[in-house]
Image (spheres, rainbow, N blue to C red):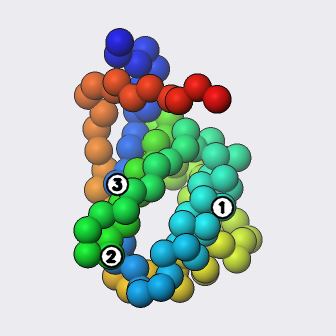
Amino acid sequence: MKNPHPPEFVVLYRWKLKAGKEAQFVESWSEVTALFRAKGSLGSRLHKGPEGFMYGYAQWPSAQARRKAFDEPIDSPWFEKMSEAVAESLPEIVLEPVADYLVLPRP
């Protein structure tokens, strides 16, 4: 069944990590996601890909909500820890949701 309330704004992030920094990156991404959820994000998913790449998928209710969250200063060491783990950051890709069939797991 199709999601009746899909996100309006989705961003795909891609990073090549430094060797041995995967755990630091995952922990940092998780903490940064929690910070942005408190500012209106609909959450994220993080995926490990081949050749040391990580792919992050973040959902927002709108482009405006994301812009507002990024414009407000956030004082947190997690951003720096995440950056320290990255060897290469590729440009983000804005995606337009057209069909959403993800099902959240039940606790």
Residue positioned 50% across, 35% down in the render: 61
Q: Secondary structure at mark 3?
A: strand
Residue positioned 39% across, 29% down in the render: 102
In the picture of the structure, the residue carrying the numbered disc 2 is: 52
Q: Residue 100 has which mark?
A: none
> In the drawing, does residue 95 fall left or right of residue 78?
left
Disc 1 to disc 2, how far (Cα)?
A: 21 Å
Q: Position of residue 6 (x, y in %)?
A: 42, 26
Q: Secondary structure at mark 2?
A: helix
Disc 1 to disc 3, how far (Cα)?
A: 18 Å
Q: Earlier in the sequence, mark 1 or mark 2?
A: 1
Q: Position of residue 52 (x, y in %)?
A: 32, 76
Quadrant location of residue 8? Answer: top left
Label 1 environment density (alpha carbons within 10 Å; few <14, some 14–19, many ≥20): some
Q: Nearer the viewer, residue 43 or 26?
A: 26
Residue positioned 34% across, 54% down in the render: 12
Q: Position of residue 24 (x, y in %)?
A: 58, 76
Q: Check whether the beta carbons of the residues at disc 1 and disc 3 lie within 8 A of each other.
A: no
> In the drawing, does residue 107 fall left or right of residue 17?
right
Q: Residue 12 has which mark?
A: 3
Q: Nearer the viewer, residue 99 or 91?
A: 99
The image quadrant where one finds the N terminus is: top left
Q: Kindly identify the amino acid type of the residue bearing the numbered disc 1.
A: Glu
Q: Earlier in the sequence, mark 1 or mark 3?
A: 3
Looking at the image, residue 96 lies above or below residue 29:
above
Looking at the image, residue 100 lies above or below residue 65:
above
Quadrant location of residue 81? Answer: bottom right
In the picture of the structure, the residue carrying the numbered disc 1 is: 31
Q: Kindly identify the amino acid type of the residue bearing the numbered disc 3.
A: Leu
Q: Check whether the beta carbons of the residues at disc 3 and disc 2 lie within 8 A of each other.
A: no
Residue positioned 60% across, 69% down in the render: 28
